[in-house]
Amino acid sequence: MSLSLPSDAQLDALREVANIGCGHAANALSRLMGGRQVDLSVPRVVLTGPADAAGLLGGDAPTVAAWLSISGGMRGLMLMALPLAEGQALETLLLGRPNSEQAERDSAVSEAANIVASACLSAIGKMTGWKLMPSVPTLRRGEARALVDEAVGQVDSDAGRVVVLEARFNAAAAPPVSGQLLLVLERESIRALLARLGV
C-alpha cells in the first residue's frame, strides 16, 4: 500500500472499518448518556503528517481529549476529543451534577473514553479476527494542537504520514454535546489491516 496514493478500494475498506468501529462507539456513548440519541457523521479517511493532524480538531481551540493506545493485531490509538465547553457538559451529564471536583470530572471522561474505545475495538476485532486491547486512558486539557501532537507522536514520532479514521458525533442533550472520534494507526498496521480485509 502506498500511504500517499491509496486505491479507491482501500479507502472504501478503511471507511467501512471506521463506520463499524465508530458506530459501536457512538452506541456505547449513547448508553452512557442515558439512552440519548448520538448521531455520527460519515467517517472519513485522512492521510496527514503529525504536525498537521491538529487541524482535525480545530487548531488551537481549547479541548479536552482522552486517548488509549491499541495493542494486539494492530497498533495505534483511539482518541475522543471535545471542545472544552462541551466536554464540561458531558462531564456534568455523566456525573449527574454540576460543579464536581476536577478529579471526578477527569475520571468520568476517562471512563467514557475507555468504554467508547473498547466498543470500537471490539467491533473491529470481530471484523478482522484480531484481539485488540486498549491501554489505560490518558486525559489532557489544552489547545487541540498540543494534544494531537502528543497523542499522534506516540503512534509515529518521525516526520512521516499517519492514517487517521475520523468521525464526528452529536448527542441530543441540553446543552448539546459534540466531539470527534479519531482512530490513528501506524503505517505497518494499516498495511496489515488492508491485507486482512483482502484489499
Image (spheres, rainbow, N blue to C red):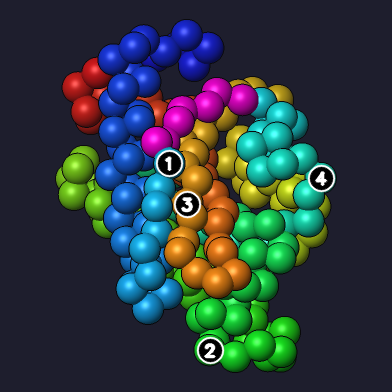
Instruction: Please tell me which of labels 2 and 1 falls first in the chain.
Output: 1
Which residue is painted at 81% across and 45% down in the image? Answer: 60
Left or right: 147, with 10 as reference point: right
Q: CA distance from mark 3 to mark 2?
A: 21 Å
Q: Quadrant of residue 114?
A: bottom left
Distance from Cα at disc 2 to Cα at disc 1: 27 Å
User: Looking at the picture, does residue 64 appear above or below residue 104?
Assistant: above
- Image point 19% across, 43% down: which residue? 127
The numbered mark, 3 or 2, whose residue comes first in the sequence reads 2
Label 3 Cα neighbours within 10 Å, binned few <14 / some 14-19 / many ≥20: many
The answer for how far apart the CA atoms under marks 3 and 4 are is: 20 Å
User: Residue 119: horizontal and vertical position, in percent?
Assistant: 32, 60
Residue 135 visible in the displayed image: no
User: Please, what is the dominant secondary structure of the magenta stretch?
Assistant: strand
Q: Amino acid at mark 4?
A: Asp
Q: Secondary structure at mark 4?
A: loop
Q: Confirm or deny contact between disc 3 and disc 1 (CB under 8 A).
A: yes
Could you say whether the residue bearing mark 1 is in a helix, strand or loop?
loop
Read off the residue under disc 3.
169
Give the camera-side residue of 27 and 54.
27
Which numbered disc flags the more N-terminal residue, 2 or 4?
A: 4
Q: Looking at the image, is mark 1 or mark 4 nearer the viewer?
A: 1
User: What is the quadrant of the N terminus in the image?
Assistant: top left
Label for residue 96? 2
Quarter containing the C terminus: top left
Q: Earlier in the sequence, mark 1 or mark 4?
A: 1
Residue 47 highlighted magenta (yes or no): yes
Q: Is residue 179 above or below residue 11?
A: below
> Pointer 2 and pointer 4: residues touching (CB < 8 Å)?
no
Q: Which residues are magenta?
A: 42-48
The answer to the question of whether label 3 and label 4 lie on touching residues, with beta carbons closer than 8 A, is no
